[in-house]
Image (cartoon, helix red, strand yellow):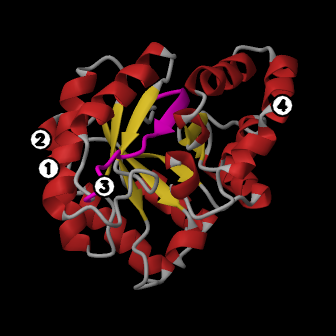
Amino acid sequence: MKKTVFTGAGVAIVTPMFEDGSVNYDVLGQLIEYQIENGTDAIISCGTTGESATLDNQEHCDVLSYTIKKVNGRVPVVAGTGSNDTRYAVELSRHAQEAGADALLMVTPYYNKTSQTGLINHYHYVADRVDVPIILYNVQSRTGVNIAPETAVTLAKTCDNIVGIKEASGDMSYAMKIARCVGPDFALYSGNDDITVPLMSVGGSGVISVYANVMPAMCHQIVADFLGGNQAQAVANHLKYLQLMNDLFMEVNPIPVKT
């Protein structure tokens, strides 16, 4: 049986910066405390919303280490360690493991646009070199690469530490195929706030959320209500804040949410 890293609402937390582009650790610490105080179930550090694509190696490692230390085991910390360079993905992943990350979030290799066989080889190579759980990250709009349902199934069956997928294609038909193929022991997280409730209706474990940066308590409540059996209330709140969720993508993420 696979180990579920978390169930509920995880925040894809922003990386606050000064005007010169350096990381503002004081504010990052405040944001982490704000998230935990408001019920967030996991902190996802150095994901897309955390600007992983533009942090240099030292910044990336330092932000991960600071976040893990600040959270101090109160909720799981999932470290974004994906790269289009397999060797660098291993380097980041090993650092995150040594720093104490509870899991890794690994985006598909972007720009290089590998085949499905290449995806399998890439993920296997990294998974064989770390011991912590890995969550696949499928976001074709950003990377140009889509994880086929069959590929997700292959990775779920052949890598013991690949335990779930963040599904950010926005395609519910695809998400349902993943849910049908991989089964209940493989965690399925919504990577799009606007389809969190629909995705949970087909077996999703929760969300890795941009919206949670703005309203963490409500994001947590929507997921907790749905998974706890109060689906009507979850749907009502989801629809109430749907426009805000969508507005956070009126410009390229994370510009709106940081604004």
- Callout 1–callout 2 Cβ contact below 8 Å: yes
Residue sitting at x 65%, y 50%: 248
Q: Nearer the viewer, mark 4 or mark 2?
A: 4
Distance in Å between CA atoms under marks 3 and 1? 28 Å
Q: Which residue is mark 3?
A: 19
Look at the picture and state if 10 lies above or below 108: above
Look at the picture and state if 82 lies above or below 226: below
Q: Position of residue 69 (x, y in %)?
A: 18, 28
Q: Which residue is mark 4?
A: 240
Q: Position of residue 70 (x, y in %)?
A: 23, 25
To which quarter of the image does residue 249 belong?
A: bottom right
Residue sitting at x 48%, y 57%: 137
Looking at numbered disc 2 in the image, what kind of residue is underneath it? Glu
Bounds of the magenta span?
6-20
Q: Which residue is mark 1?
A: 95
Q: Nearer the viewer, mark 2 or mark 3?
A: 3
Looking at numbered disc 3 in the image, what kind of residue is underneath it? Glu
Question: Left or right: where does residue 160 sit relative to residue 207?
Answer: left
Q: Position of residue 202 (x, y in %)?
A: 76, 39
Looking at numbered disc 1 in the image, what kind of residue is underneath it? His
> Does label 4 or label 1 sit earlier along the sequence?
1
- Callout 3–callout 4 Cβ contact below 8 Å: no
To which quarter of the image does residue 140 belong?
A: bottom right
Task: Please check the rendered image and state whether residue 18 is part of the magenta-colored stretch, yes or no.
Answer: yes
**Helix, strand or loop status at disc 1:** helix
Would you say the magenta stretch is mainly helix, strand or loop?
loop
Q: Nearer the viewer, mark 4 or mark 1?
A: 4
**Helix, strand or loop status at disc 4:** helix
Residue sitting at x 62%, y 42%: 183
Few, some or many residues within 10 Å of mark 4 (<14, 14–19, 20+) = few
Look at the picture and state if 112 lies above or below 242: below
